[in-house]
């Protein structure tokens, strides 16, 4: 059985006729940028290896379901922690 590979110039698999890739240039073009996630600054946090492994697994599962990644899940966990300890965080 022989399997053929597409040529390097074959872009038919990349064509997407039903979806717009770039936002329209109308009034709402920048609305998606305004409603994007908050600006994040880097912070190194050290986790136990088993916690890190489970966080990565959780992020992998959630990425497909809700689109959340490790920073999103970490912020969600911190928000719950802040509520528990009564820490007020400005929005």
Image: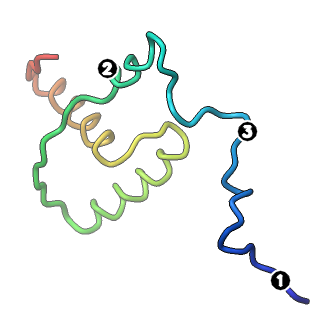
- The dot on residue 34 is 2
Q: Position of residue 89 (x, y in %)?
A: 11, 21
In three-dimensional space, the C-alpha distance between marks 3 and 2, rounded to whole angstroms, equals 27 Å
Q: Earlier in the sequence, mark 1 or mark 3?
A: 1
Sequence order check, earlier mark of 3 and 2: 3
CA distance separating discs 1 and 3: 27 Å
Q: Dot 1 lies on which element?
A: loop
Tag shown at residue 3: 1
> Residue at coordinates 48% horizontally, 14% vertically from top-left?
26
Compared across the picture, whether 17 is left or right of 79 comes to: right
- Label 2 to label 1: alpha-carbon separation: 47 Å
Mark 2 residue element:
helix
Q: Residue at x 52, y 22 (%)?
A: 24
In the current view of this chain or complex, which residue is farthest to the bottom?
A: 1
Nearer-N-terminus badge (2/1): 1
Position in image of residue 38 (x %, y %): 24, 29
Task: Tell me if 12 is positioned left or right of 78 in this view.
Answer: right
- Residue found at the far right of this picture: 1
Q: How many marks?
A: 3
Q: Residue at x 75, y 78 (%)?
A: 5
Residue depicted at x 43% and y 19%: 29
Closest to the camera, between mark 1 and mark 3, is 3
**What residue is disc 3 on?**
17
């Amino acid at each position: 059985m022989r399997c053929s590979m597409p040529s390097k110039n074959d872009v038919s698999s990349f064509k997407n006729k039903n979806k717009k890739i770039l936002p329209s240039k109308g009034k709402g073009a920048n609305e998606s940028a305004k409603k994007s996630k908050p600006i994040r600054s880097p912070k190194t946090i050290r986790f136990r290896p088993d916690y890190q492994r489970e966080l990565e697994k959780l992020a992998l599962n959630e990425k497909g379901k809700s689109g959340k990644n490790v920073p999103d899940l970490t912020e969600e966990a911190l928000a719950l922690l802040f509520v528990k300890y009564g820490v007020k965080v400005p929005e």
